[in-house]
Image (spheres, helix red, strand yellow):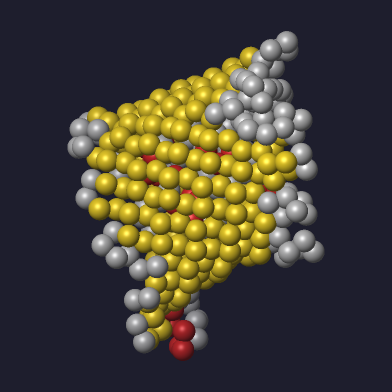
Amino acid sequence: MAGVALAVAGAPAAHADAVNALVYGQFNVSLDVVTATAPDRDPPSTTHLSSNASRFGLRGAEYVGGGLLASWQIESGFNADSGGGGLAVRETYVALEGDWGRVKLGNFLTPYDDVLPIFGNVTTLTTSILSTAALWAQGGVPKANGGFDRRMPNSLRYDSPDVEGLQASLQYALAEDDRDAGVLGAGITLVRGPLEAGIAYEYNRAVRGADLDDHAVTATASWNFGAARVAGVYEYLRYRTFDGPLSRDLFGASVTIPVATGALYAFAGRAREGRGSSQVRVGGLTGGDDSGAWQYTLTYSHSLSPRTMLYAGIVGLENERNASYTFAINPYTQDSPTGLKLRGLVLGAVHFF
């Protein structure tokens, strides 16, 4: 990304060395054509333009002495398709870092998200309905309803220094409510030569309600062979419900193949049948027979320049008769019955600034 240095005229002399900011952002818009089928009903198909994590932000840093660097970021989202948006609704924080690592406070994603690029669709920026988090992390489900991999307000985070490619993170987000709810996240990533690997854990304490705690753990690894990069992922979700625990496993694999000035990417993931009562549902998950789902994604991205990229892809989300998962980004919400089968065609463009 390119940035523009801003100088603020008339700033107090004592702060003159701190009034540098980098402006950055991206436009990401796609045309999405989604067809849907479901048992015993006829859900509508849709065609729409989508703004996929379009954003702009300011960030800056100041050396404060003693080997310490203070940094900050204010990131806002905007709807590139229809206008509007929100100020500071994305990665927004203040941080202090040194040889001992970094402490960060604000509103930002948890360590659970750090492992997504290892197996996810980096070539299309892990966003749009092509996102590989439809099943993984129940990415289309709000945090209050059982989703993981969400941006958390009121967060405190520590990131360790990078030691030969190994880094650990710990984060806690305060819900600031009368239930003493909160979200604890921890993760370790490793980047060493052609190998990338990560493991992450997230604990939602009373987020869905009093005495309803949720747990998620995921492990992933990839190896870059040069001609192709292959990756795998495993995830375990466990929810506490009033009818006992509800859990499920997920397995997935992906491959990325460089092609000229672009890349081909393919992913397939399987959420297995839920273990627990078929009388309760958390997001798209319930227990019993025919409660699993498949997701597949095939994309091609093409760079027109260092700042502009085109992409195209197809995505399928195949719920079994009793499952009701949906897309992670721009969820299909017009009619989301159990057994829904979604197929999408995406044509998109991104410009970074």
Residue 202 can be seen, yes or no: yes
| On screen, residue 171 above or below 63 | above
| On screen, residue 156 above or below 185 | below
Q: Quadrant of residue 312?
A: top left
Name which residue lies at 50% across and 82% down. 11
| On screen, residue 118 above or below 71 | above
Name which residue lies at 38% across and 76% down. 100
Would residue 352 be found to the left or right of residue 181 on screen? left
Would residue 52 be found to the left or right of residue 339 on screen? left
Q: Quadrant of residue 90?
A: bottom right
Q: Residue furthest bottom?
A: 14
Place of residue 233 in the rendered image (x, y in percent of width and height, measured from the top left) = 42, 38
Query: In front: 326, or 53?
Result: 326
Query: In front: 61, or 84?
Result: 61
> Total number of numbered labels?
0
Name which residue lies at 66% across and 60% down. 182
Name which residue lies at 39% across and 72% down. 101
Q: Residue furthest left?
A: 226
Residue 81 can be seen, yes or no: no
Place of residue 185 in the rendered image (x, y in percent of width and height, measured from the top left) = 54, 58
Place of residue 207 in the rendered image (x, y in percent of width and height, measured from the top left) = 70, 53
Query: In front: 286, or 40?
Result: 286
Place of residue 249 in the rendered image (x, y in percent of width and height, measured from the top left) = 53, 35
